[in-house]
Image: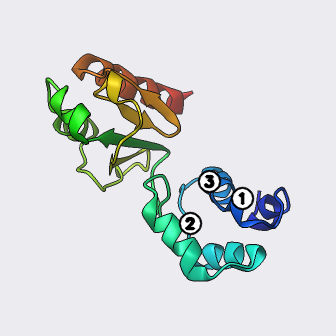
Amino acid sequence: MDLVAVLEQFPREQTYLIEILLKYQSLKPTQHLNEDELKTVADHLDLPESHVYGVVSFYSFFSMSPRGRYIIQYCRDVPCHINDDFDVKASLEKQLGITTGQTSEDGMFTLEYSSCLGMCDQSPVIRVNDKVYPRVNEKKIKALIAECRSDCDD
């Protein structure tokens, strides 16, 4: 689906900006947005380009750089950090073979830091694409990554 088709699904109102951007970004295999696309959205909604760019740069679920099929985000806000009896970041980096901000060579995984994922009472948490996984530990992370890899083999 191209951007114009996505735009046609929504009213031309600023309140739909985030929904439009999320929907379109999720349809792209590289899960990112580029400057031309932001300009098109801004023109469609009659918004300044700077406003659309500001929204994309503010929220961690948007990206202007190509990303992997599975975007793994880990929370390092205070509750997750305090309740983290092991190093979530180190575990993810070790198992994925990449550091935060990188995408694996096969294009399967991108690892990102995120501010609060909204589940402080169930920390530590990670998000894979749109799904949040509470109370993760080393074993759960290994199983999750293995599941993602096996989904790609099917």
Residue at left 70%, top 77%? 40
Dot 2 corresponds to which residue? 33
Report the amino acid beneath label 3: Leu
Q: Upstream in the sequence, badge 1 or badge 3? A: 1
Residue type, mark 1 in image: Tyr
At a point 25% along the width and 21% down the height, the residue shown is: 137
User: Which mark is drawn over residue 80?
Assistant: none
The residue lying at 74 percent from left, 79 percent from top is 46
In whole angstroms, how far apart are the C-alphas of marks 1 and 3? Answer: 10 Å
Front position in the image: 4 or 150:
4
With 18 as the anchor, is 89 left or right in this view?
Answer: left
Cβ atoms at labels 3 and 2 below 8 Å apart: no
The 10 Å Cα crowd at callout 2, few under 14, some 14 to 19, many 20 or more, is many
User: Which quadrant of the view contains residue 118?
Assistant: top left
Give the labeled residue for mark 3.
22
Q: Nearer the viewer, mark 2 or mark 1?
A: 1
Disc 1 secondary structure class: helix
Q: Which mark is residue 16?
A: 1
Q: Position of residue 15 (x, y in %)?
A: 70, 60
Q: Indicate the quadrant where residue 122 lies.
A: top left
Q: Quadrant of the N terminus?
A: bottom right
Q: Residues within 10 Å of mark 1 (few under 14, many from 20)?
A: few
Question: Residue 78 location, x and y as percent?
Answer: 21, 38
